[in-house]
Image (cartoon, rainbow, N blue to C red):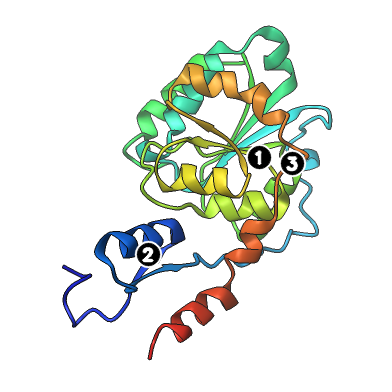
């Protein structure tokens, strides 16, 4: 419909240039245009030292999962994966959950936290977090967890991963998997489940020196505005 109706001059597809090219080829048109998802680098809170503030040893591996915690973000699957840690891993890993825990999973979330007890070091900041705090958290961490169950969208966490060059653990399918692979931002999982997430922890650590900043270079406010401007005639 959009490719053939004259009322649609341009159709922007956010953060998915490949799909725009694909649709143009199928429908023999030039209406579809990939629109960068603009990422604005965040400042790090100069007075926020996450490891000192939360007594996280410098030699601990810090995994972070942040933003609004909901069913679609795989938050509960992350918690379930922690029951699979062996004693050595439990002593050397810390998991930080930062952001409001939504009502759809709140009861289950805290029930799973209680069941884990003292098995592994878990920190929960169940509240809105400032950008400065999130910047400090990303700087301090080793791996960013975004094992989303809803894969048909992008994620702001991708920009954080690129800016701070920290690997993500993400789904393989959907738009988010495509972006992680295209920009070399970490590892992707064919299936989001407690065992696959657990198995990915050590693998993610092997990517810590390989993360590209290209995503931030490509997806910025200037490229977003230029794309719109160049396609409105």
* Mark closer to the chain start, 3 or 1: 1
Q: Secondary structure at mark 2?
A: strand
Q: Report whether residue 114 is seen.
A: no
Specify the quadrant that holds the N terminus: bottom left
Viewer-nearest residue: 57 or 43? 43
Point 39% across, 51% down: residue: 153
* Mark closer to the chain start, 2 or 3: 2
Identify the residue at the far bottom of this view. Answer: 233
Label 1 belongs to which residue? 167
Q: Position of residue 147 (x, y in %)?
A: 48, 35
Point 57% across, 65% down: residue: 219
Label 2 belongs to which residue? 13
Question: Does 64 sit left or right of 37 as displayed?
Answer: right
Q: Position of residue 45 (x, y in %)?
A: 74, 59
Q: Position of residue 130 (x, y in %)?
A: 60, 58
Point 43% across, 33% down: residue: 74
């Amino acid at each position: 419909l959009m490719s053939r109706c004259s009322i649609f001059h341009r159709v922007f597809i956010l953060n998915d240039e490949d799909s725009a090219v694909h649709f143009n080829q199928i429908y023999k048109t030039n209406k579809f245009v990939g629109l960068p998802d603009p990422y604005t680098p965040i400042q790090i809170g100069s007075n926020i030292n996450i490891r000192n503030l939360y007594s996280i040893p410098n030699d601990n591996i810090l995994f972070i999962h942040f933003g609004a915690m909901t069913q679609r973000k795989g938050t509960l699957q992350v918690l379930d994966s922690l029951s699979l840690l062996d004693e050595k891993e439990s002593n050397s890993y810390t998991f930080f959950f930062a952001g409001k825990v939504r009502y759809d999973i709140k009861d289950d979330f805290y029930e799973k936290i209680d069941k884990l007890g003292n098995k592994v070091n878990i920190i929960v900041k169940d509240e809105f977090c400032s950008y400065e705090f999130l910047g400090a958290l990303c700087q301090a961490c080793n791996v960013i967890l975004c094992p989303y169950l809803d894969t048909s969208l992008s994620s702001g966490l991708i920009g954080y991963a690129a800016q701070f060059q920290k690997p993500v653990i993400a789904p393989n399918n959907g738009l988010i998997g495509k972006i992680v692979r295209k920009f070399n931002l970490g590892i992707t999982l064919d299936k989001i489940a407690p065992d696959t997430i657990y198995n990915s922890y050590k693998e993610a650590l092997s990517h810590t020196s390989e993360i590209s900043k290209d995503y931030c270079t490509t997806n910025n406010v200037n490229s977003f505005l230029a794309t719109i401007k160049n396609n409105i005639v």
